[in-house]
Amino acid sequence: MIKYIRTRKEWLILLIRVYHGMEISAAVCWKVGEGVKVEEIQVDPPKATEVRLKMLCSSICHTDISSIQGSPMFNFYPLALGHEGVGVVETVGDEVKNVKEGDTVIPTYIEECQECENCISGKSNLCMTCPVRLTGLMPDNTSRMSCRGQRLYHPSSCATWSEYTVIDAKLLVKVDPSIDPAHASFISCGFSTGYGAAWKEAKVESGSSVAVFGLGAVGLGVISGAKMLGATKIIGIDINDMKREKGEAFGMTRFINPNNSDKSSSALVKELSGGMGVDYSFECTGVDPLLTESLEATKVGSGKTIILGLGNEPYVSLGLFTIAFGRTLKGSMFGGLKPKSDLPLIADKCINQEFPLQELFTHEVQLTDIEQAFELLKQPNCVKVVIKI
Ligand SMILES: [Zn+2]
Ligand SMILES: [Zn+2]
């Protein structure tokens, strides 16, 4: 192994960065509807329980787009964006024990104290000691990022469309440095949310039937999880015909494009499942009427629907009779995955290439060209845009 020795100048630069912060490039959204701009921002050193990461790679998740458009969950600006990604630990706070300088890590936005009622029971991944933060700030209600003297908020636990970011060390999951950076970024949110929803929330059984509404990274993650659990009928629904090939690569057995029929999506799913509907459905689009459709697509009395797509409206309509007939609707954050317990297992599968994550990687931009990424997302063949940093 080659031992890297820093020169005096490099030590000096490092000391300045550790104690005085650094000027770096990051994507900033100044207000709703303005899109993002790459700006020179200040990133402060980490506090005692925090870590500063040098980002290797990031990607775009639908929640980022919601934040730019004005999400009911995150209504504070200016925003430093991005929550998917992978990075290397650059500086650690004095009290950090779980990671060290040079470790390759994935940032998450859910904590797992392993001591509270939910963490122990196994019923939920939502830690009661450290709830998901919706303040856009660090746990001490301050920010480590600023731009021209203005505090920057970050909708998730940190901002990954940035050369460097600061995050609470408890939210980091260490991964093998041999992991493909783009694939590591995909499993940090979208794909794992879908995979976890099939695995942890629905607990899909062998031989069961599944319908997935929306075949983006989350929906393709659901298909992958359902296949791993032995589902024999996996129906993908999307209005983009190019998603058929993607769905099949992950294990989808039938494809529906509802635009090619006068019938409703739920009626089309029932036609492919003996008239009764499926055991489990997953709503991954956040499009209001599809919530009722995804419920209606499941069996009366026992069907279960997991809602993963979040639109920009705080309230949605729901067909009362769909749920009155004994169906269950379950919400989910991060697909029910516990970062410390479950994400390392997905990272191992990622390294062992147990799912074809390269199928998600359709486009790539440099951080400095991130504005182009939003145009790429409109292309029909686009699944994920990787941001090289
Ligand atoms: Zn807990
Ligand atoms: Zn996400």
Image (cartoon, rainbow, N blue to C red):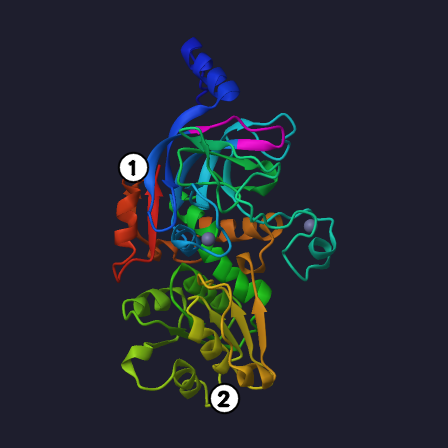
The stretch of residues the image draws in magenta is 42-51
* Residue that lies at the very extreme toward the bottom in this rendered image: 275
In depth, the one of 219 and 144 nearer the eye is 144
Query: Foreground residue, 375 or 102?
Result: 375
Q: Considering the image in quadrants, where does the C terminus appear?
A: top left
Report whether residue 202 is seen. Answer: no
Mark 2 vs ligand 2: CB below 8 Å = no
Q: Which residue is mark 2?
A: 276
- In this figure, which residue is indicated by the disc labeled 1? 368
Q: In terms of depth relative to the viewer, which is nearer, 343 or 144? A: 144
- All told, the count of numbered labels is 2
Whole-Å distance between the Cαs marked 2 and 1?
51 Å
Report the side of 84 relative to 279 (left or right).
left
**223 lies above or below 295:** above
Tell me the SS state at disc 2.
Answer: loop
Instruction: Give the percent coordinates (x, y) of residue 193.
Output: 50, 58
- What kind of residue is marked 2? Met
Q: Nearer the viewer, residue 206 or 10?
A: 10
Q: Residue 158: percent from the left, percent from the top?
A: 50, 41
- Tag 1: amino acid: Thr
